[in-house]
Image (cartoon, coloured by chain):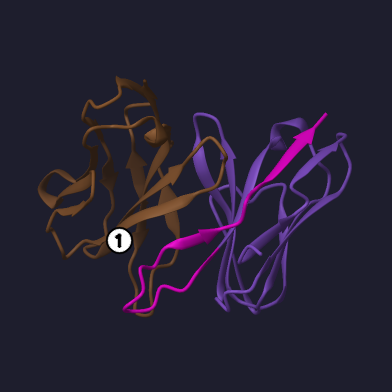
Amino acid sequence: AQKVTQAQTEISVVEKEDVTLDCVYETRDTTYYLFWYKQPPSGELVFLIRRNSFDEQNEISGRYSWNFQKSTSSFNFTITASQVVDSAVYFCALSDFTVGGYQKVTFGIGTKLQVIP
Amino acid sequence: DADVTQTPRNRITKTGKRIMLECSQTKGHDRMYWYRQDPGLGLRLIYYSFDVKDINKGEISDGYSVSRQAQAKFSLSLESAIPNQTALYFCATSDPQPGNTGELFFGEGSRLTVL
């Protein structure tokens, strides 16, 4: 069975601080996908990134960066120089991998990030 | 207009009532999903469908049923609503083909309150 653990339920930081959101996953599959989604206070779910299990390169997109470590089954998300607009709930997710795409996506419980001005 | 549309967006009902949440999409995706979101529990998969003839239970399907009326439509029903089904429900689609991001495209959510 797949499992995603986001141990930090709530984090508060002061604007401009860096913050890292942790994600640890469990799967028996050798190939799989990992995702991060953002849910701002307005409620919609916004896709941020997908990472394949066979691609362990870290990724940076503006102030966002992701660190994928297969050895520790972690896929952590760092926001550099946080802004108030980063305040949201962030979900880490895991899916299996089959020919033609994954079957289903399992989400963590989410980490609520509050950035204080 | 949104690519994935859910109706109703908000609904208050009473215990024992039958409720249907509808989802339609214009993305042309075969795969559709229903998730429920509860505080502290994240998003949990209720049902998913890979085409009109393929429907699968998720982790919390008890008390729910679904219908895939067409490629573009996927409805979630609560035959006899109970208070612990009070939650925010999301419909989603995906097209996880090579070359795509494989992301889920979510509707705006349907907030259901069962009194």
How many numbered discs, if any?
A: 1
Q: Quadrant of the C terminus of chain A?
A: top left
Residue A96 percent across, percent down from the top left: 34, 63
Going by the numbered disc 1, the residue's amino acid type is: Tyr
- Pick the residue in front: B29 or B35: B29
The magenta stretch is B93-115
- B109 lies left or right of A88: right
Q: Which of A74 and B105 is in front in this view?
A: B105
Judge from the rendering whether residue B38 lies leftward or rightward of residue B11; answer left or right: left
B67 horizontally vs B31: left or right = right
Tint applied to chain B in the drawing: purple
Magenta span includes B99: yes
Q: In this view, does A10 lie to the left or right of B85?
A: left
- Work out whether residue A25 can be spotted: yes
Q: Which residue is drawn at 14% across and 54% down?
A: A58
- Crowding at dot 1, Cα within 10 Å, few <14 / some 14-19 / many 20+, comes out as some
Which x, y percent locates residue B51? Answer: 59, 78
Residue B108 coordinates in the image, percent (x, y): 62, 51
Picture coordinates of residue A103, whole percent (x, y): 43, 67
Q: Residue at x 39, y 30 (%)?
A: A84
Q: Is B24 included in the stretch rendered in magenta?
A: no
Q: In this view, does A35 lie above or below B73?
A: above
Q: What residue sits 39% from the left and 39% below the top?
A: A90
What is the secondary structure assignment of the residue under circle 1?
Answer: strand
Q: Which chain is the one coloured brown?
A: A
Quarter where residue B33 is shown = bottom right
Q: Mark 1 lies on which chain?
A: A
Q: Quadrant of residue B15?
A: top right
Residue A111, visible in the rendered structure: no
Q: Residue B52, located in which quarter of the rendered image?
A: bottom right
